[in-house]
Image: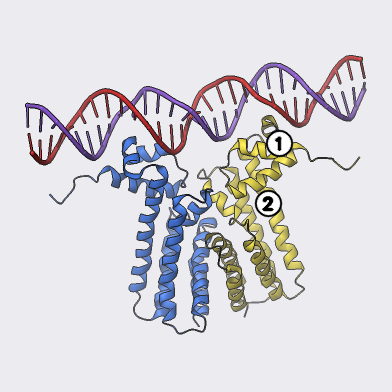
Chain colours: A blue, B yellow, C red, D purple
Amino acid sequence: MGTRTQPGPRERLLAAAQELSYQQGVNVGVDALLSAANVARRSLYEHFGGKDGLIAEVLRRAAAEDLERYRSAIAAAGDDPRQRLLAVFDMLDQVVSAPDFRGCRYLGADLALADQAHPAHAVTRQYRQALHELLAHEVERLDLPHPAHVTDQLMLLVEGTLATGAARPTSRPARDARELVQHILG
Amino acid sequence: MGTRTQPGPRERLLAAAQELSYQQGVNVGVDALLSAANVARRSLYEHFGGKDGLIAEVLRRAAAEDLERYRSAIAAAGDDPRQRLLAVFDMLDQVVSAPDFRGCRYLGADLALADQAHPAHAVTRQYRQALHELLAHEVERLDLPHPAHVTDQLMLLVEGTLATGAARPTSRPARDARELVQHILG
DNA sequence: CTTCCAGTAGAACGTTCGGTCTACCCGGCG
DNA sequence: CGCCGGGTAGACCGAACGTTCTACTGGAAG
């Protein structure tokens, strides 16, 4: 029977934590996570060793999903690197316009977790590096004078779009950023 | 004797909270604030009504200081609106390069305080509006086609600079942003 | 000197935090 | 059947949370 009637407690916990830690922030309480997932307290500690482990795993999951969202947006935009990079900001326009958008999950985690030794920081760092490489790969195909520099500018526009989308929900930051991307790429 | 030997408990508390709530995040504990300020527990509740009131007042103070930093950076850059706007990002370059830079205080507060009714949110909204008007005033002097649009783009670059500075400390986001500003302003 | 009051020091409140523990339940397998 | 492992339910722990309270102190004003 390959079809599971209900996901196991590990899956339920990850799904609930991914949602709650984003809407409420990573400082959400353990009790809230458990009751949202309908999972026994013990399961959390057996599967993830503690709240920190759960949060880190949630970020890993979210990072994989988000990177895939970037990749598929790029892939669906054809072969022209310019169009592929512009497509990233079309995708971001939908992301920040969603009614439940609450900002960049990874920046929120980094700002909220004062302890620099928290395992979440390593995850966010890896995520940004992966995204950076994703963009760099497209930029390199353009044969521009300073590809590394341009890639950093694109990353800045991505972060700025997400931050502005969270701070000023009425604005349309992705449209503004997209226009700047057209400037950058000539 | 106009010279006070030591600032009163209200001042000490504000100063300590301004520092601690930035380095540790707004979820820092009351005990930490009190011991850092060397202030009695009771003083907090008499002067600010509670932790929420203290945090909101701290943000008001910080907002006034930060806006003044923008204003003086602009004023010191002469009369050309282009140079004045570029000077903003020269100032930001120093801000994000400081060793104790921990990101945008206001975005951090908005992301960390899940309760939308928290008084801090009103303060951050006012701060961003004031900054927006500050930039808009300079942009209008340039007689560009779409001043409101350009102002939003500048705001996005400011937010992106601060976010990137927090997320990727080795980068120099303000330099990248400054270059984009030159593109925007022609 | 006496009064007064802002401030200090700190106990104590009830709640919530993350984490540990015991007891029970149930389905699959030997 | 008997066992066993993963799961649930929930009591329990020490610590920290924000808040309220009483008792005391020191200096300025009357």
Whether residues under marks 2 and 1 lie with C-beta atoms below 8 angstroms apart, the answer is no
Give me the residue at 62% from left, 73% from top: B178
Residue at 39 percent of width and 59 percent of height: A63
Q: Chain of mark 1?
A: B
Q: Are marks 2 and 1 on the same chain?
A: yes
Question: Hey, what amino acid is under mark 1?
Answer: Asn
Image vertical order of residue B23 relative to residue B48, above or below: below
Q: Which of B40/B74 is in front?
A: B40
Horizontally, residue A135 falls left or right of residue B174, namely: left
Residue type for callout 2:
Ala
Tag 1 or tag 2, which sits nearer the N-term? 1
Q: Which residue is mark 1?
A: B38
Does residue B21 sit above or below B81 in this rendering?
A: above
**What is the x, y in percent for residue D7?**
26, 38
Q: Which residue is mark 2?
A: B62
Residue B111 in view here: no
Q: Position of residue B80 (x, y in %)?
A: 73, 76
